[in-house]
Image: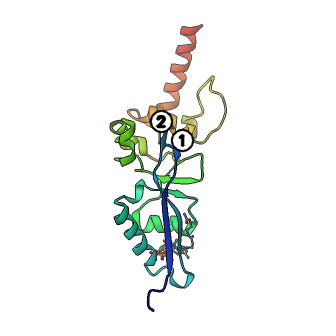
Amino acid sequence: GQGTVVGLLKVGRKKLYVFDATGAHHEMQPLCVLDFYVHESKQRMGCGKTLYEYMLSEENTLPQHLAIDRPSEKFLGFLYKHYGLHKILPQTNNFVVFEGFFIAHPDLKKEGRGNILQSPSLNRFSADVPKNSIATRDNEVEESHTYMQPTLYGRYAAHKPPSTIGKILQNSGSHHSQQNG
Ligand code: ACO
């Protein structure tokens, strides 16, 4: 019909602490997807994609640079289908950011740490960390913040095969305690 509204897409900037794959947090005000809806009768016909593409072009941004406020399963499916986004960097709030978020993110330049964060390893999703490679640290307080896992993974896995992480951490741990004691 004439100008019938079939959907809406609302974006805006939010002040967030965004955790990278090393577990370091960055105070940022990224562009966030806050509301996205296409009428039931018009879903799965490409309307969402058209809306999203328009927004990306208007905002001059990339899909991986957006933070998503509590995405639904449909929206997650949408992001995977159209943009290949599925590897989530664990956060402590309701916003979801994907692998690649920190790569060349325009808002990070203000931090002066852009170069460090260009490394893809800092953006890598870490859910595939072998459990035994992160649970071997002595003297580590057992507060299980989920974002602690990437800290170990990103920092120590960068130049070493993952299978030896546990050993390395154990050895360096006992080495230090010998030195200190
Ligand atoms: N079930 C599963 N996946 C779906 C569905 C559905 N009912 N609808 C869309 N998708 C995903 C799928 O990946 C689908 O691809 P497929 O059909 O090959 O499986 C793809 O989206 C289709 O892409 P489009 O047609 O471009 O998207 P659409 O016009 O359907 O818009 C949207 C996507 C906005 C998520 C729409 O489905 C919708 O409004 N859903 C209900 C409300 C909702 O969940 N909104 C997001 C809430 S989170 C937030 O707003 C931040």
Residue at 41%, 56% in the rendered image: 64
Q: CA distance from mark 1 to mark 2?
A: 8 Å
Note whether 56 is above or below 152 in the view shown.
below
Compared across the picture, whether 123 is left or right of 40 comes to: left
Can see residue 105?
no
Label located before the other in sequence (1 or 2): 1
Residue 167 coordinates in the image, percent (x, y) = 51, 27
Q: Which residue has dot 2 on it?
A: 163
Q: Give the class, few, some or many, for how many residues have Cα within 10 Å of label 1's Cα (few <14, many ≥20).
A: some
Note whether 22 is above or below 14 in the view shown.
above
Label at residue 130: 1
Amino acid type assigned to the residue bearing label 2 in the image = Ser
Disc 2, ligand 1: is the CB inside 8 Å?
no
- Circles 1, 2 touching at the beta carbon (< 8 Å): yes
Residue 107 coordinates in the image, percent (x, y) = 39, 46
Q: Looking at this view, is 160 or 156 the one in front?
A: 156
